[in-house]
Amino acid sequence: MIDHRRLGRELDLFVSDPLAGAGLPIWLPAGAAARHAVEEYVRELERRAGYRHVYSPPLGKRQLFEISGHLDYFADDMFPPLRLSADDEFVLRPALCPHHALVYRARGRSYRELPLRIAELGGMYRAERSGVLGGLSRVRAISLNDAHNFCSLEQVGAEVAAILGLIREAHAALGVRPAGFRLSLRGPEQRYVGDDAQWSRAEELLREALAGVEYAEAPGDAAFYGPKIDIQIVDAAGRESTLSTVQLDFDKPAKFDLWYTDADGARRRPVLVHRSLVGSMERLFAYLIEVHQGAFPAWYAPVQLVVLPVDEGQAEAADRFAADALAAGLRAEVDRAGSLGARVRGAARRRVPYVAVIGPREAADGRVSLRLRDGRGLDPMPAGDALGLVARVVAARSADLLGAG
Ligand SMILES: [Zn+2]
């Protein structure tokens, strides 16, 4: 069976070392290169959609999480506070919202700034029990693609619709195939903040945003502060989990006393939309490794191009071609150790999308022979054309290695 933990080992993507601790995987260079490409893509997608990125620390004063309600409603999922002295305690944050509320509050806000979209790919922690941890899919240190969109009540519908559009775009680029949409509502068992009228209004707004989308209702799966739309994925073992999410929150703006000055001069409270386009980098990659069986689309493949000189006579041409590829922004390597057949098989084992073979004839007239990971081979072509082809496919984030479709 396909298992991201086995592929992660074979492809040197990440390692789980008991000395580091369960649920605290370490990303190796190949995994980090792929993740870096995905992070860059998501940041750029958000930037173009009007998001403003911030950095905030993964821990904060205890009071910050008392105000947010996390210590009241979410303590079971958090690590115990870190105590420096009796009145100086810190909490490893279980969510980024409290910090982003402080970003909003850093100065007065006007209606002209709304929706204000504060984004961060930030660290947070969950005290998961060791029995449920596995590879990247359930971890204790989480790197979340997160954002908090502060808007007026009238803007909520359009904002949620725009977020769902971004989620679809990101899923298409990454090769995510959602298993379904879920509207997560209050249930009888849990504790929730906020009043009934606010919850009903929030549920109504989310139902409106889902008009035309097929979804299931999940009573009892709401966050403690509001209902949400969850986009589910299913892993190779058939386990379902949430990847992307859009959550409405009337509560935190009140808890943090957030305001904006409206057009008529009145002070009004914004609505907070928590959203993640692609979830945590850990869960996303656990899924992507399995769904692509380690053969990522070229744009986030750890190594995009391996250059193979047939023998030492083409070493210089191979180095030059690889240097040009690096200069063009590609992740390229030269492999000259062992027989050509063994090196071709090695690149296939690593799921490298493009192999450029340079023999004596190619070296003499500045050409390379490209072989694609899917078995297709191209006639020798000028080195510049080969680089152009790979760079075009990468820039277009195409799933096809020749950029078709
Ligand atoms: Zn949040």
Image (tube, helix red, strand yellow):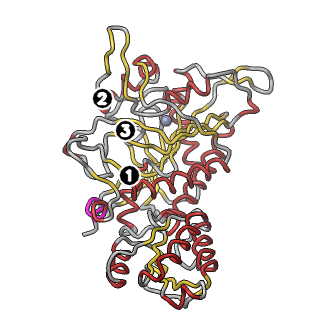
Q: Residue at horizontal 27%, vertical 59%?
A: 5
Q: Secondary structure at mark 2?
A: loop
Q: Which residues are magenta?
A: 3-7
Question: Where is residue 196 drawn, in percent x and y?
Answer: 49, 29
Q: Secondary structure at mark 1?
A: helix
Residue nearest the observer in this picture, 131 or 335: 335
Question: Where is residue 68 drawn, in percent x and y?
Answer: 46, 24
Mark 2 vs ligand 1: CB under 8 Å? Answer: no
Q: Residue at horizontal 60%, vertical 88%?
A: 365
How far apart, in angstroms, are the residues tagged by discs 3 and 1? 26 Å
Residue 387 falls in image quadrant: bottom right
| The N terminus - image quarter | bottom left
The mark closer to the camera, 3 or 2, is: 2
How far apart, in angstroms, are the residues tagged by discs 1 and 2? 20 Å
* Mark 1, residue position: 283
Which amino acid type is shown beneath numbered disc 3? Gly
* Mark 2, residue position: 79
The image shows residue 353, relative to residue 196, as above or below, that is: below
